[in-house]
Amino acid sequence: MQLVTTSEGIGRLEGDEVVLLDVAEPDLSAHLWVHGSLERVVAAGERRRLPVADVTLLPPLPRPGKVWAIGLNYHSHAAETGREAPAEPMVFIKTTSSVVGPGAQVVLPAAAPSQVDFEGEVAVVVGRRASAVRAEDAWAHIVGLTACDDVTARDVQSGTGNFGLAKSFDTFTPLGTSLTTLDDYADPDDVGLETLVNGEVRQRARTTDLVHDVGAIIAYLSRFTTLEPGDVVSTGTPAGVGVVTGTFLQPGDVVEVRVEGVAPLVNQVVGAPGDR
């Protein structure tokens, strides 16, 4: 089931319609925090149907509790950078204030506009509290998948060595469009991912190429911290990022992240307000 958060509340996508659901919470973040699962959403009755064009689609989780991300986590990406795949997950955290939804603009920051890069990723959404979880039990704590664009100011990343700082500018975490529940996947460890810039495919991979799969990531993180309902874990980006060729995002570019089973995430890049 493809679940969405809209300007009219929580709904599910059915073709070119949004079926608004009879649940109390305004968004999936709030619902997961209160209930720790999506069972009530999945079972909820229909309030009304609207054309997708008549609602504003927000991030499925407008304010995740935390956004965890993993660096250098595809074998293909490690190979293109000439680095060894890390023996343990390379973890950083992004600020929740950087989260935006489908259709929102990605703003090139005035402080670092010239080396902004895309990173299409498969993200998992935590639905059940996870502390010291075993890898084989990790999927029991996940409620679904979504798409993430882990936008990065590469000059800030290289200049400071601080991944979180380089990736937490406002608008640097597009998320969505849908949160797709796990029952839609025959094997959630084998999911396709593509990133397009202006219609050209720049990244294409399957999560079978992850260095550390979802089970390993959740087990590792939950050794050090408690993952809570509504947390997002973005699992890394494959080969094809712009920094390798020196091709960075420019005003007017359109980035589309396609995660198998998830409604496409599309965002346009714009300059900082003073540069428009």
Image (cartoon, rainbow, N blue to C red):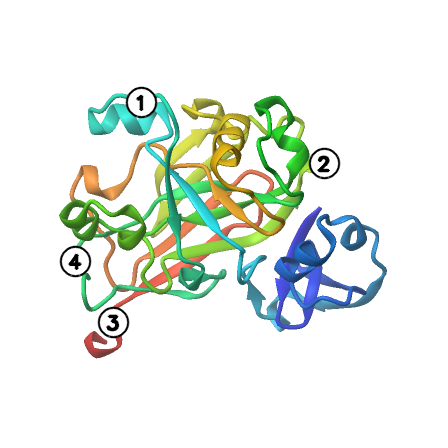
- Side of 250 relative to 185 (left or right): left
Whole-angstrom CA distance, mark 3 to mark 1, is 35 Å
User: Which one is earlier in the sequence, the residue at label 3 or at label 2?
Assistant: 2
User: Which one is earlier in the sequence, the residue at label 2 or at label 1?
Assistant: 1
- Of tags 3 and 1, the one toward the viewer is 1
User: Which one is earlier in the sequence, the residue at label 4 or at label 1?
Assistant: 1
* Residue 30: image location, x then y, percent: 65, 62
Residue 114, numbered circle: 4
Residue corresponding to mark 1: 85
Relative to 97, residue 214 above or below: above
Q: Which residue is depicted at the point 59% across and 36% down?
A: 131
Q: Could you tell me the amino acid type at mark 4? A: Ser
**Residue neighbourhood size for the residue with mark 3, other residues' Cα within 10 Å, grouped as few (<14), some (14–19), many (≥20):** some
Whole-angstrom CA distance, mark 4 to mark 3, is 11 Å
- Of tags 2 and 1, the one toward the viewer is 1
Q: Secondary structure at mark 1?
A: loop
Give whichever of 172, 178 is nearer the camera: 172
Whole-angstrom CA distance, mark 4 to mark 1, is 28 Å
Q: Could you tell me the amino acid type at mark 3? A: Ala
Relative to 273, residue 53 above or below: above
* Residue 38: image location, x then y, percent: 73, 49
Q: Could you tell me the amino acid type at mark 2? A: Asp
Residue 183, numbered circle: 2
Q: Secondary structure at mark 3?
A: loop
Q: Which residue is depicted at the point 62% across and 58% down?
A: 29
User: Which one is earlier in the sequence, the residue at label 4 or at label 3?
Assistant: 4
Q: Secondary structure at mark 2?
A: helix
Mark 4 touching mark 3, by CB under 8 A?
no
Residue corresponding to mark 3: 272
Q: Which residue is depicted at the point 42% across and 30% down?
A: 205
